[in-house]
Image (cartoon, rainbow, N blue to C red):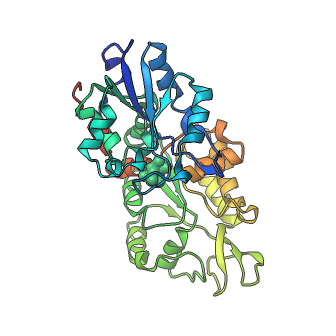
Amino acid sequence: MKLPQLEDLPDVAGKRVLVRCDFNVPLAGGHIEDDLRIRSALPTLEWLTGRGAQVTACTHLGRPKGKPDPSTDVAPVRARLKELAPDVALMDNLRWDAGEEANDPAFVDRLVAGQDCYVDDAFGSAHRAHASIVGPPARLPSAAGRLLAREVEVLSGLLNDAKRPFVAVLGGSKVSDKLGVIQALLDKVDALVIGGGMCFTFLAAEGQRTGDSLLEADQVDACRRLLALGKRIVLPSDLTLLGPDNQVRQGGTSVPDGWKGLDIGPGSAAEFSDVITDARTVLWNGPMGVFEDPRFAAGTRTVAEAVAACRGFTVVGGGDSAAAVAQFGLDKEIDFVSTGGGASLEFIEQGDLPGLRALRESVNA
Ligand code: 3PG
Ligand code: MG
């Protein structure tokens, strides 16, 4: 799993270095809501500029369809980067060119033209076999940036020698996206706690009524098989429900028609907290409910507080749970907030990622 590091590059003084970052930050009306992904790249950018390299950063932003589109202009990112790292230039949105997602060799040629070295610090995109991720290492001396290297070190540590009890807490809306990672985690953890929209498909698999809650009916059998493995899966025992006339009430796990569960209930939040408090390693990905709405934020907040207070090693991954801990002012209490959502889950599931493979196979490795 050894990745080439910045120190493995030829002397960068006076050289041109292309740095792939993941500056895919949340934007609202052209305003950056959270610049974590930009700040996280600074150690790498400063290492390079401090040694006299001429640095050009590149990133995707949003999901434009291979052509310029004003709503995904990197201008706000460029402005923020100018404040944080004034000597670093930023290319236009990589996904404005269809060659990026298609991994077109001609697009790779254009990216590396005039560059002497390549650094990949885009952990959040390392699961994408796109041109800017997998192309340059086959052409230029290449290295992992500090952020990418640290993300991989932390996640590998969780998979290979986590202190026990190791507890994973998963939330978010779709269980179908997470079946693979659930399967992989069940082999590693002492308890898997499940909340968020995805819990309803598990509750249905246990024979509960889910009312109008989120349900992936075609995944009920898969959830039933996971429950039958005999591993410790902790599901909610109560819920916060929204009714047909927009009334909010607490309920059990049998949800009447016309009602939907939008958060775990206070009993579940307390039970989840107990499991988290006893852990020596915690991995949390995905909110427990629709926490953007204060009526359904309590479950996510209680879990965030338990993770923050846990004395074990705590890792939070995924844009929504990272945003939740920041919103509750708890981000400083977490040992490691991953900049990768999909990438961290895919790393846990597969044990490797296309971006990491490309670096290991780079021309200088
Ligand atoms: C992310 O935010 O998940 C990464 O930047 C990857 O973006 P993508 O899911 O659009 O490929
Ligand atoms: Mg994504």
User: How many numbered discs?
Assistant: 0
Most distant residue in the bottom direction: 257
Q: Which residue is drawn at 30% across and 30% down?
A: 113
Residue 356: quarter of image:
top left
Residue 300: quarter of image:
bottom right
- Provide residue 288's location: percent of width, then percent of height: 61, 61
> Does the image show residue 71?
yes
- Provide residue 190's location: percent of width, then percent of height: 46, 52
In this rendering, the answer to whether 288 lies above or below 142 is below
Q: Residue at x 31, y 22 (%)?
A: 116
Viewer-nearest residue: 98 or 193: 98
Viewer-nearest residue: 44 or 334: 44
Residue 32: quarter of image:
top right
In this rendering, the answer to whether 27 lies above or below 147 is below
Viewer-nearest residue: 263 or 4: 4
- Provide residue 234's location: percent of width, then percent of height: 54, 63
Q: Quadrant of the N terminus?
A: top left
- Provide residue 219's location: percent of width, then percent of height: 41, 75
Q: Residue at x 31, y 30 (%)?
A: 3
